[in-house]
Image: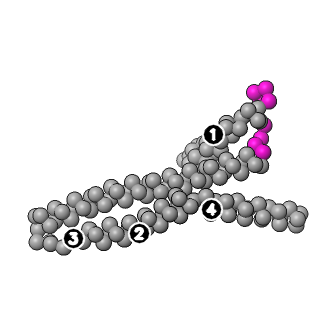
């Protein structure tokens, strides 16, 4: 059973708290923290989303490197000690490498584009719902 401050939401709460400390000079009143402004929250959420996207790619690249190293060693041992003479390891190396390349392009290099688009979509939705109320 997860307690308060644990689980998948805890990381996002901690990241927003860290980001709010960046702006603490603006929002601190005699030791009491005021709420973040909408712009500060937007920037904190953008920074958090961008960091999560880059972290996801780094984890993907690390897993790729570890698994491919193991497969290369396995394929080399099979070629050296058995009748297998086919270097099958190149298929997962290239196939997964293509996926990793696209993850790098769209999840690391261009990650800010979909994050900004999502922020604009959320703001547009908020404006539409505000008009309905």
Q: Earlier in the sequence, mark 2 or mark 4?
A: 2
In the image, taking residue 40 as reference, residue 11 lies left or right, namely: left
Q: From what the image shows, is residue 87 above or below residue 27?
A: below
Check disc 2 and report its element: helix, strand or loop: helix
Which-is-in-front pick, marks 3 and 4? 4
Q: What's the distance in space between the residues labelled 1 and 3, CA to CA? A: 49 Å
- Toward the viewer: 104 or 74? 104
Callout 1: SS: helix
Disc 2 designates what residue? 98
Q: Magenta segment range?
A: 29-37
Q: CA distance from mark 2 to mark 4?
A: 21 Å
Please tell me which of labels 3 and 4 falls first in the chain: 3
Task: Give the mark nearer the N terminus: 1 vs 2.
Answer: 1
Separation of disc 1 and disc 2 at Cα?
Answer: 35 Å
Residue 117 quadrant: bottom right
The residue at the point 69 percent across, 49 percent down is: 43
Marks 1, 4: nearer the viewer: 4
Q: Is residue 8 visible?
A: no
Residue 112, horizontal then vertical, whole percent: 61, 58
Q: Is residue 81 above or below residue 58?
A: below
**With 68 as the anchor, is 108 left or right in this view?**
right
Q: Quadrant of residue 94?
A: bottom left
Q: If you read the primary sequence from the N terminus, does the residue marked by circle 1 or circle 4 appear first? A: 1
Residue ID for mark 1 = 18
Residue under the point 76% across and 35% down: 26
The residue that mark 4 highlights is 113
Residue marked by disc 3: 87
Front position among marks 1 and 3: 3
């Amino acid at each position: 059973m997860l307690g308060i401050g644990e689980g998948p939401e805890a990381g996002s709460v901690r990241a927003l708290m860290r980001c709010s400390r960046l702006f603490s000079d603006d929002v601190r009143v005699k030791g009491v923290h005021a709420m973040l402004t909408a712009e500060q929250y937007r920037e904190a959420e953008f920074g958090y989303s961008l960091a999560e996207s880059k972290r996801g790619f780094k984890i993907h690249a690390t897993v790729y490197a570890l698994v491919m190293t193991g497969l290369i060693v396995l394929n080399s041992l099979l070629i050296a000690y058995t009748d297998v003479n086919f270097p099958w390891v190149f298929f997962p190396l290239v196939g997964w490498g293509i996926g990793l390349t696209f993850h790098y392009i769209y999840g690391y290099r261009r990650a800010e584009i979909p994050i900004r688009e999502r922020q604009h979509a959320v703001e547009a939705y908020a404006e539409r719902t505000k008009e309905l109320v």
